[in-house]
Image: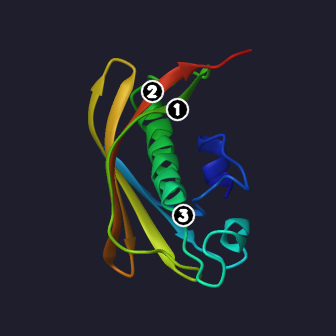
Amino acid sequence: MEEIHRRIPHRPPFLFIDKILDITETGATASLSVRADLPFFEGHYPGNPIMPGVLLCESVFQTGAIFLADYLKNQSLKDEDVTPVLSRIRDARFKRMVLPGDEIEISVSLKDQIGQFYNLTGEIKNKGKTALTISFALALVKNQE
């Protein structure tokens, strides 16, 4: 968790990654053990809990922010006064459900950069099969004092 906390500002209960598996020059892979005791399961289809699609997307966005933190550091572009924030979501496709007890693998790849905007694609795999694909953009926003 310390590696995650050093890279992004997210903290429980709004942290949807629990392990960084790999970070390369063009992307990152993380994972999440979907615990049955996560609070949103109480109200999201009681008796038949399903991880909300919006939180699956959030796990991809957080993996993208982890990638971007390392990418900027490696490119000597890291400015301590910026935070990567979501600026665009495109083409989210939900293909399989994610249930309590599942272990998901989350991967992101950098497609291009236009100014302070970084366009990425993401995918979640559950039991080796695609559960979600999405394209999104993160923007670097100066921190407020």
Q: Which residue is mark 1?
A: 85
Compared across the picture, whether 34 is left or right of 14 comes to left
Compared across the picture, whether 22 is left or right of 49 comes to left
**Residue at the left extreme?**
111
Quarter of the picture containing the C terminus is top right
- Secondary structure, mark 3, is loop
Q: From the top left corner, tell me how far across and down residue 116 is, in percent.
A: 40, 20
Q: Amino acid at mark 2?
A: Ala
Of label 2 and label 1, which has the lower sequence position?
1
Nearest the viewer among 132 and 142 is: 132
Q: Amino acid at mark 1?
A: Val
Q: Residues within 10 Å of mark 2 (few under 14, many from 20)?
A: many
Q: From the top left corner, tell me how far across and down residue 6 is, in percent.
A: 65, 43
The residue that appears at 39% across and 28% down in the rendered structure is 75
Q: Residues within 10 Å of mark 3 (few under 14, many from 20)?
A: some
Using the image, determine if residue 79 lies above or below residue 38: above
Quarter of the picture containing the N terminus is bottom right
Q: Which residue is mark 2?
A: 139
Q: Which residue is mark 3?
A: 52
